[in-house]
Amino acid sequence: MGYRVVVVGATGNVGREMLNILAERQFPLDEVAAVASARSTGDEIDFGDSGETLRVKNLEHFDFAGWDIALFAAGSEASKIYAPKAAAAGCVVIDNSSLYRMDPDVPLIVPEVNPEAIADYRKKNIIANPNCSTAQMVVALKPLHDAATIKRVVVATYQSVSGAGKDGMDELFEQSRNIFVGDTAEPKKFTKQIAFNVIPHIDSFLDDGSTKEEWKMVVETKKILDPKIKVTATCVRVPVFVGHSEAINIEFEDELSAADAQKILREAPGVMLVDKREDGGYVTPVEAVGEYATYVSRVREDSTVDNGLSLWCVSDNLRKGAALNAVQIAELLGRKHLQKAG
Ligand code: 11C
């Protein structure tokens, strides 16, 4: 016996990946429903590469009663209206929006990092999925924190346009093409030209001059990994279609050599260490597309602080940063709490 699972926002970048990953990982399903806004109702979409197609249902009229798990990837506005309805109908919501992440009654889960926190899901029947840039960072930090206790993290991100949805990907494609043929490259989705450029601004500005994306990396890392860790982030949009990269500098309580960190990371769940210290001996976002791992490269000691390390971290933001993490949460929920599948 399997689960009845709903994917809300099934036609978006993350929703499609959720369907792909449910199919790829052979999630124990009795039934899967693809749900989206009225504009996509009746469209047919692939259930991964299973050969099965799903007809998209209208979220406004969808009855969540009798469904076990709903993976929401339709944005905060849709989550605000429909996640509580699904939860009240007895369907556990795994929400990819930022809406519930900092709610003390909603666990924020990365299964490799804080699986035990999932037990609290019963308070609201909702579990939050972290921001993509946080998810990959905490997967890399967790085993190092366990070994030498992290005091402070300084991170700069290089985030792909797919983090801004299909419109972001279309804008990079169209601007690149327009520039090649001598046309203008007017920004629409982004605030400045993204093709052949980088933009130090993701999400809205806050009073202290940081952005909401940077704030999320700070507060989500504290909630998932350890409230004592200090984080400062600079989040940057780069002209890459899929795959977020991060340059991470870490200050530890205790000494940790680069060699010991490499050894720890080689064994760590969810991490793939590719660190050859030679031309090409590191991972770039293009190579991370379609993969499950959080890749770590360029591990080295930082002699400018006591017990400092620097490293490079890359992952598929639509997978570990969103859809894969959500499906892993569903797997954890099934194994530990719902225990329906035989
Ligand atoms: C980006 N990280 O790359 C964002 C996308 O809070 O779930 C995901 C935003 C979020 O633009």
Image: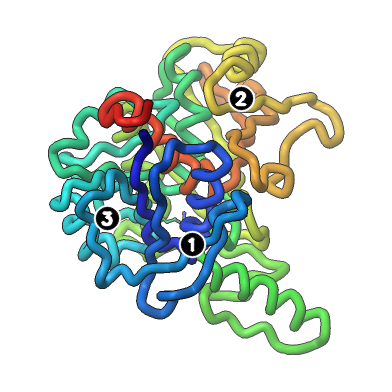
- Labels 2 and 1: the sequence-earlier one: 1
Q: Would you say the residues marked 2 and 1 are in contact, meaning their CB atoms lie under 8 Å apart?
A: no
Image depth: mark 2 or mark 3 in front? 3
165 up-or-down from 106: above or below:
below
Instruction: Confirm whether residue 272 shows in the render.
Output: yes
- Mark sitting on residue 54: 1
| Closer to us: 113 or 229 | 113
| Closer to us: 340 or 138 | 340
For label 1, being within 8 Å of ligand 1 is answered no
Badge 1 element: strand
Give the amino acid type for the residue marked by disc 3 in the picture.
Answer: Leu
Quadrant in which the N terminus appears: top left
Identify which residue is drawn at 67% across, 62% down.
239
Image depth: mark 3 or mark 1 in front? 1
- Labels 3 and 1: the sequence-earlier one: 1
Asked which quadrant contains residue 341, the reply is top left
> Marks 2 and 1, how far apart in space?
51 Å
Instruction: Report the residue marked by disc 2.
Output: 302
Instruction: Report the residue marked by disc 3.
Output: 99
Identify which residue is drawn at 51% across, 76% down.
189
- Labels 2 and 3: the sequence-earlier one: 3
